[in-house]
Structure formats: structure tokens, C-alpha cells
Amino acid sequence: MSIRHDQKEQRKSLILQSALDLFIRKGYGETKIADIAKAADMSMGLLFHYFDSKEKLYEELIRIGCERLKMDFNFSSDSPLAIFKGAAEEMFNMISINPFAAKMFVLMENAQHLESLSEDLKEMLIEADKLIKRSIPLIEKGQLLGEIKQGNAEALAVAFWCSIQGIAQYIALHPEKPCPNTMWIMSIVENKEGALRSED
């Protein structure tokens, strides 16, 4: 790839990161395109070369967030608990080493409450929000195997994913704070009694 192409990609990345910081600190409505250009240390003319408007820039961030939140539960593993553990480890690793990823959780949560979004973006957010529903059959399978504690599968899914969401948002706003241990989150769904019986 050419140096020119690399420079363009770096500028685009800088614009996205600057906009993301402002959107989560000031909110979408309060952030002006001039604020983003200033934060990215470039002219508004150069910024418009990459994004036509604040709306297009916000849309791009939402698309990135939706793409990253897609999780496929059709893994070959026979252990639902192992799938949840892998997902939690992946999420925590991502937010620990990549501040951009942690901030995306804040942006995605805030976007859920914006009425001015286009229909396309609303559809994307609905898809991204299906993570809880898609994990319910996995929890039910884990309950049958004795790996996952008994109880309402949807409620367990809510507790698990909302804990990760809340932690990600906190780390995004307080990057100097330590990320919790994955096993603490796993205790939300893990059937400890079943694990002990399998060790006997």
C-alpha cells in the first residue's frame, strides 16, 4: 500500500477517535463538526473530505460498533459455559488493550436513546441488541448439562451481558481503573454445584 493511502487511513482513524471522544463526553447534540475538526487538529475542509457531515461520521461509528458486537454462538464447542467464558475474555481483553473499543460501548448505549437516527441505523442497533436473545438457547442448553445455574434463561442472559456492558462503559470513562477478573462475571451464570459434581 502507498504512503498516501496509509496517511488517509490514519487521518480517518484520527477523525473517528476524536469524534468518539466528543460524542461520549458531550453527547451527539452538543458536539459540533467544528469541535471534531479542532480535536483532530485539522481544517473543517479536510474533515469534510472524509465525512460529508456530523451525521455521516456518527453513522460510521455506529456501523463499526454494530460490526464489533456481532457474536456467533454456532461454535463447535459442546460446552455453553466455555462459549460464555470465551466471549467474556474476548470482551475484557478488547476493552483493556483498546480504549476505542471500550468507548464504543458507551456510544452504542447512548445511540439507543436517540430519536433522530435514520431507519437504517435503528435497524442496525436492533440487530446488535439481539445478543441477549441469541444467548438464551445457549443458557438453556447449559442448564440441561448442569454447567449453568438454574433460573430464568433470559434473566441470566441480561445479568451476564449487562454486567459486561456496564464494566466496559466504566473502563471507557475511567481508563486508569483495573478491569475485573473474568471469573467474577462467570459466577453470574456458572453452576458451581454442577462444576463440583463433575470433578468428583
Image: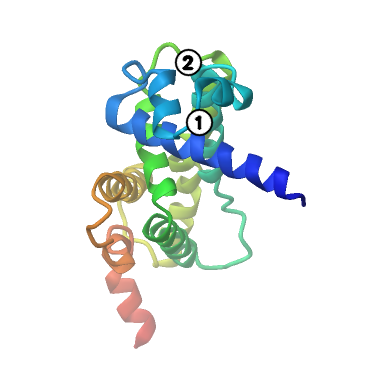
Seen from the viewer's position, the closer of residues 90 and 176 is 176
Q: Which residue is mark 2?
A: 117
Looking at the rendering, which quadrant does residue 60 occupy? top right
- Which type of secondary structure does the marked residue at label 1 adopt? helix
Residue 130 visible in this rendered orientation of the protein: no
Question: Which amino acid type is marked by label 2?
Answer: Leu
Tell me the crowding category of disc 2: few under 14, some 14 to 19, or many 20 or more residues within 10 angstroms, Cα based: some
Seen from the viewer's position, the closer of residues 104 and 152 is 104
Question: Which amino acid type is marked by label 1?
Answer: Ile
Residue 62, label in figure = 1
Seen from the viewer's position, the closer of residues 156 and 89 is 89
Q: What is the x, y in percent for residue 113?
A: 35, 21
Seen from the viewer's position, the closer of residues 77 and 35 is 35
Tell me the crowding category of disc 1: few under 14, some 14 to 19, or many 20 or more residues within 10 angstroms, Cα based: many
Which part of the image, by quadrant, shows the C terminus? bottom left
Asked if the residues shown at circle 2 and circle 1 are in contact, with their CB atoms under 8 angstroms apart, the answer is yes
Residue at 49% x, 30% y: name it: 42
Q: CA distance from mark 2 to mark 1?
A: 10 Å
Q: What is the x, y in percent for residue 73?
A: 56, 53
Residue at 55% x, 14% y: name it: 119
